[in-house]
Image (cartoon, helix red, strand yellow):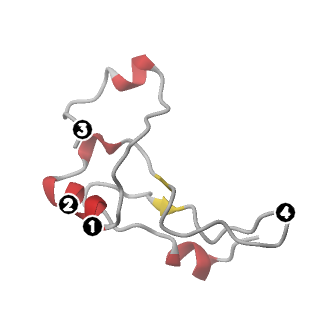
Amino acid sequence: MVNEAEREGRALRVEGLVNARDLGGLPRQNGTLTPRGVFFRSENVDWVTPAGWDQMREAGIRTIIDLRQAGEQAQDTQPTG
C-alpha cells in the first residue's frame, strides 16, 4: 500500500493538470518497485498551458498515449503539445 507521503512524492506538478503522477515507486509482487520517471498518468491534458507542456518536457515526457474514447477526445478544445 502507498502512503500519503509516497503519493505526494510521486505527484507531477504541471500547470493545467490537477492529478498527474509518476507511476514509479509502486510495489510489485516480487518486492521490487516500479522505476521512477518512466511512466506517468494524468487526467485530460486539454487544459495544459504552454508552461505546463514545458514542465512535462523537463520531466522527460516525450510521448502521450490517450486512452480515452473518440467521443471524449472530440470534446477537447486545445491541440496537444
Q: Amino acid at mark 1?
A: Glu
Q: Residues within 10 Å of mark 3 (few under 14, many from 20)?
A: few
Q: Amino acid at mark 4?
A: Gln
The residues tagged by marks 4 and 3 sit, at their Cα atoms, a distance apart of 35 Å
Q: Are marks 1 and 2 in contact (CB under 8 Å)?
A: yes
Which residue is disc 4 drawn over? Answer: 29
Count of labels shown?
4
Near-viewer residue (69 or 64): 64
Task: Answer left or right for 24 relative to 60.
Answer: right
**Reading the chain from its start, which is encountered first: label 1 or label 4?**
4
**Reading the chain from its start, which is encountered first: label 4 or label 2?**
4
Task: Answer left or right for 27 relative to 66.
Answer: right
Q: Residues within 10 Å of mark 4 (few under 14, many from 20)?
A: few
Q: Amino acid at mark 2?
A: Asp
Which residue is disc 2 drawn over? Answer: 54
Disc 4 element? loop
**Reading the chain from its start, which is encountered first: label 1 or label 3?**
1
The residues tagged by marks 4 and 2 sit, at their Cα atoms, a distance apart of 35 Å
Which residue is disc 1 drawn over? Answer: 58
Q: How far across and how far down the image is residue 68, in percent?
A: 47, 29
Near-viewer residue (3 or 35): 35
Within the image, what quadrant is residue 63 found in? top left
Disc 3 element? loop
Quarter of the image that includes the N terminus: bottom right
Within the image, what quadrant is residue 26 found in? bottom right
**Reading the chain from its start, which is encountered first: label 3 or label 2?**
2
Q: Residues within 10 Å of mark 1 (few under 14, many from 20)?
A: few
Which residue is disc 3 drawn over? Answer: 80
Q: Residues within 10 Å of mark 2 (few under 14, many from 20)?
A: some
Q: How far across and how far down the image is residue 52, in percent?
A: 23, 58
